[in-house]
Image: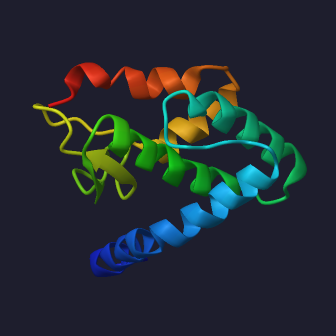
Amino acid sequence: MPTMQSELDRFEQFLFEMDDVLEQFLAAASSAGFDLDYSLSSLESLEEYILGELTESGNSELVKNRAARYLGELFRKNVGGRWQLCLKNPKYLYYKLPVIVGYADRPIEFCPIQVIRNFVRMKRRGMLRTAVESHLEFKA
C-alpha cells in the first residue's frame, strides 16, 4: 500500500511533468487536426479528440490522463486556482486525485480526471464546457 509520502512524491512528479506531457498531447492533437489553445471554445475540439482517440488508441487511461491535464490547465487559465492533491478524507470522492483549488471564496475544487471519466462514460457533447463554466460563478 502506498505511503502518504509516496503519494505526495507522485503528485510532485505529476506537476513536474505537466509541461512536457501537455506539449506532447497538444502536438498529437494538432497532428490529428485539432486546435487546442486553452480557450473555452477548444473544449468542443477536446471532446472530439478524446472520443476519436479512445476509438483508435489501445491506451484509454493515457488518453484520459493527458486530457485531464489539459482540462485542468484550461480551467486554471480561465477560472483560476492551483493544482493540489486532495487529501481531505479517505472517503471523499476525490481523495488522492489531483484537483484545482483556490479559485473560489469557498472550499470547493474541480477534479479534471473525474470530469473526463464522466465524459468518456456518458459521451454527452458540451459536457466539458458546462463543467468548467459552472465554476465561473465561484471565481474569486
Residue 25 falls left or right of residue 8: right
Quarter of the image containing the N terminus?
A: bottom left
Residue ID at (67%, 42%): 35
Q: Is residue 17 above or below residue 121?
A: below
Residue ID at (15%, 37%): 107
Tell which of 95 and 138 is nearer to you.
Answer: 138
| Residue 120 visible in image | no
Tell which of 20 and 84 is nearer to you.
Answer: 20
Q: Where in the figure is residue 81, as x and y percent of width and height?
A: 24, 45
Q: Is residue 40 above or below residue 29?
A: above
Q: Is residue 61 above or below residue 110?
A: below
Q: Where in the figure is residue 80, as x and y percent of width and height?
A: 26, 41
Q: Quadrant of residue 83?
A: bottom left
Quarter of the image containing the C terminus?
A: top left
Residue ID at (64%, 56%): 26
Residue ID at (29%, 74%): 4
Residue 98 falls left or right of residue 63: left
Tell which of 100 and 20 is nearer to you.
Answer: 20
The image shows a total of numbered marks equal to 0
Q: Where in the figure is residue 20, as x and y percent of width and height?
A: 54, 72
